[in-house]
Amino acid sequence: MLGWALTFLIIALVAGLFGFGLVGGMAYGAAKICFFVFLVLAILSVLTGRRLPT
């Protein structure tokens, strides 16, 4: 999940660099969602003491 967030963040940065505002905004939104889902799953994994399947 973190890999997807980083991928979308890189796409957003490249799109912003070339001036594609809509694509960059959508990729940035997807990166934020993926990152927060990853964060919640990581916290749940730490609290339960088990590793979530990858």
Image (cartoon, rainbow, N blue to C red):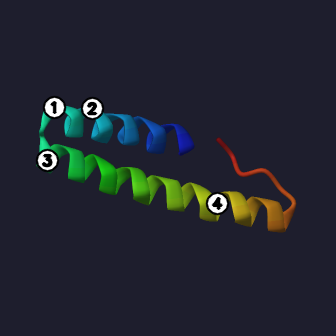
Indicate which disc, 2 or 4, sits on the residue closer to the N terminus: 2
> Marks 3 and 1, how far apart in space?
9 Å
Mark carried by residue 21: 3
- Rendered image: mark on residue 30: none
Residue 16 lies in quadrant: top left
Distance between mark 1 and mark 2 Cα atoms: 6 Å
Could you tell me residue 12's position as x and y percent? Answer: 29, 41
Q: Is residue 12 left or right of residue 20?
A: right
The crowd level at tag 3 (other Cα within 10 Å; few <14, some 14-19, many 20+) is: few
Q: Which mark is residue 18?
A: 1
Q: Are marks 1 and 2 in contact (CB under 8 Å)?
A: yes
Q: Position of residue 1 (x, y in %)?
A: 53, 45
Q: Which amino acid type corresponds to the residue marked 4 in the rendered image? A: Leu
What residue is rendered at 42% in x and 59% in y?
33
- The numbered disc on residue 41 is 4
Which residue: 61% across, 59% down? 39
Measured from the top left, where is residue 31 in percent x and y?
Answer: 40, 50
Seen from this angle, which residue lies furthest right? 49
Task: State the residue in front, 47 or 25.
Answer: 25
Q: Amino acid at mark 1?
A: Phe
Sequence order check: which comes first, mark 3 or mark 4? Answer: 3
Is label 2 or label 4 in front?
A: 2
Sequence-wise, the earlier of marks 1 and 4 is: 1
SS at circle 1: helix
User: What residue is rendered at 46% in x and 45% in y?
Assistant: 5
In the image, what residue occupies the spot 17% across and 44% down?
23
Confirm or deny contact between disc 2 and disc 3 (CB under 8 A).
no
- On residue 14, which mark appears? 2
Q: Is residue 48 left or right of residue 43?
A: right
Count how many numbered circles sit on residues in the image: 4
Q: Secondary structure at mark 2?
A: helix
